[in-house]
Image: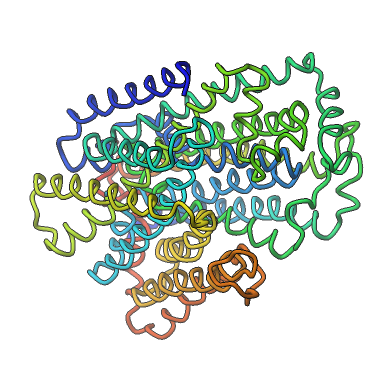
Amino acid sequence: MNEHVFQLIQSKMRFLVRAIILVFLFYFMLPLSLIFIPDAMNQTSFIPGVTWAWVYGFLQIPMTWLVGWIYHIKAKRFDQQIEKIEREGMV
Amino acid sequence: MNLTYFLFFICIIVCTLIITYWAAKRSNTTNRFYTAAGSLTGFQNGMAIAGDFISAASFLGIVGMIAINGYDGFLYSIGFLVSYLVVLFLVAEPVHRLGKYSLGDVICSRFPSNKMRWIMAFGAFAISILYMIPQLVASGYLLRLLLDIDYSISVLVIGGLMTVYVVFGGMVATSWVQIVKTVVLMSGTFLLSLIVFSNFNWNISALIDRVKEGSPLGEDFFFPGHLFGNPLEFFSLQLALVLGTAGLPHILIRLFTVRNTIEVRRSLISSTWIIGLFYLMTLILGFGAIALLGYESLMATDPTGNLAAPLLAKEVGGDFLLAFVSAIAFTTIVAVVAGLVISATTAFSHDIFHHILKKGQSTDKEQLKAARWTALGIGLISTLFALRLETINVTFLVSMTFIVAAASNFPVLILTIYWKRFTQVGAITGMVSGLLASLVLVVLGPHIMNPDGGWIARESLISLHNPGIIAIPIGFLGAYIGTILSSKQAQREEEFKQFFIKSQTGITSRRESP
């Protein structure tokens, strides 16, 4: 079996595992922080009149868009490399 | 029903039937019927995924939840949105590469057997039906409340429409009805949000002040803790929401409707943009409802809060806008139930009829005929069920769908794609334990066992309304134990490597087009 392809998949997997861990941490920290540090989350944030709970809740939306976009770029590069390997008949 | 309402509804019914007529002429092969022959672009499919996903519960329910419970209502929508990253990262591309029409195809590409296909078809079928019935029942109530139409007529109209879309137009019609729904829903909520803002002279502080005045919670409206008192319940729900989407068959089969994995990624990224923007707008609508209508008048009309959005529309735009929003709610329901019909149809006619009963030997014509008859049967049976369930509370089935999906399909999909030692026995025990655990935990929970109007009138044995935190680990554990007990059946390393490379790159896959 072609080692080039396998190495490429391994590097994609490393990225995916890191990304999914970060996403889960970022996401589950929201309910956990609301459960364990409600007072801190109810403090007004750097935006006047808006608490940290709202800021953190809102941030989940751009986080989803940003992480999705980063993956899109990474995966495109991965596809191109795979295509190159296929074209060169290395499989 | 006055003329404005009637015209809006006729307009939607006529438009969607024209789409179905157009689609019917294009749904003349099995491939087109089940997957629109992969002809959708990523953006179109992203709109269809959003249309498939945003149910009436999302549109009306979340606006109501925000209006009544403030911050906690908003948290619900965050879980739904982030779940798309799990789909994008872990399952979307492998599912597209390994499957043809159904989730059964995906799992059977590693564990080809009739037993496996039976279980996967049953899982997909059960999830789709479990989700469809509460949607139909809710649609009956909703149309009765909004338009004063009889419950049975509402259910018959919606059940009839969804059946017609799928029987004649297959996936092409379903997709385009969902795309139209997304366009109508997004433009309608955007318009309503603008009108709400204009009522406060585009001043957010004025809106927030009025929210505090309108809600009995006052300042506390903007603080968490009004919907989820029990932290474990809260965490459990978030877990089921974020993992559930990756196991929902009606969402996953949409990944077969595009031609390659670039379009799969585009589909999911577009849907996260649409769904994210939509939930931001529901926040404005929720705030607007409590600020402009006040708590008492919301509660007086419907204590569940589900009518917050339509009432808000009436308040800011009179009967015309109310008719428009009701039409949006109607489109939302038909688009979602049509997606569920095609998902249940695929599980039955492709997995059970074609692969199991006909041993994969039926012709394209036979398969197409079977699919259309199956769709008709499923449409009829679910409509009949919904008609009979008028007086029974079935809303718990919606949250149960996410739990079943997260506890059965999700573990099996993930372990099939990524775990080298996973075996067919593990996949079967995982599916069965996830399904059974979800079912038993819901039956023993307060949805069913409740002295105050539950099906079993006594104290519940499990206090969680959303037992995802117990059911999901049981699904994984069942799969693990099954695998350990059958470790002799594990594939050879080289065999798994071939499968893994195919799932990750498409190499050796004949489906992938350049």
Task: State left or right for residue A5 relative to residue B438.
Answer: left
Measuring from the top left, give residue A9's x and y in whole percent. Answer: 45, 53
Observer-nearest of A21 and A40 = A40
Measuring from the top left, give residue B280's x and y in whole percent. Answer: 66, 32
Residue B11 sits above or below residue B460 on the image: above
Identify the residue at horizontal 59%, vertical 72% (top origin): B457
Numbered label tally: 0
Identify the residue at horizontal 65%, vertical 47% (top origin): B76
Residue B403 sits above or below residue A65 on the image: below
Is residue A80 at all visible to an observer of this figure? no
Observer-nearest of B240 and A14 = B240
Measuring from the top left, give residue B390's x and y in whole percent. Answer: 45, 51
Is residue B443 at all visible to an observer of this figure? yes
Task: State left or right for residue B132 relative to residue A67.
Answer: left
Identify the residue at horizontal 25%, vertical 56% (top origin): B348
Identify the residue at horizontal 32%, vertical 51% (top origin): B384
| Color encoding of the figure | rainbow
The quadrant of the rendering that contains the C terminus of chain B is top left
Residue B55 sits above or below residue B361 on the image: above
To which quarter of the image does residue B466 belong? bottom right
Observer-nearest of A79 and B484 = B484
Measuring from the top left, give residue B147's x and y in whole percent. Answer: 49, 30
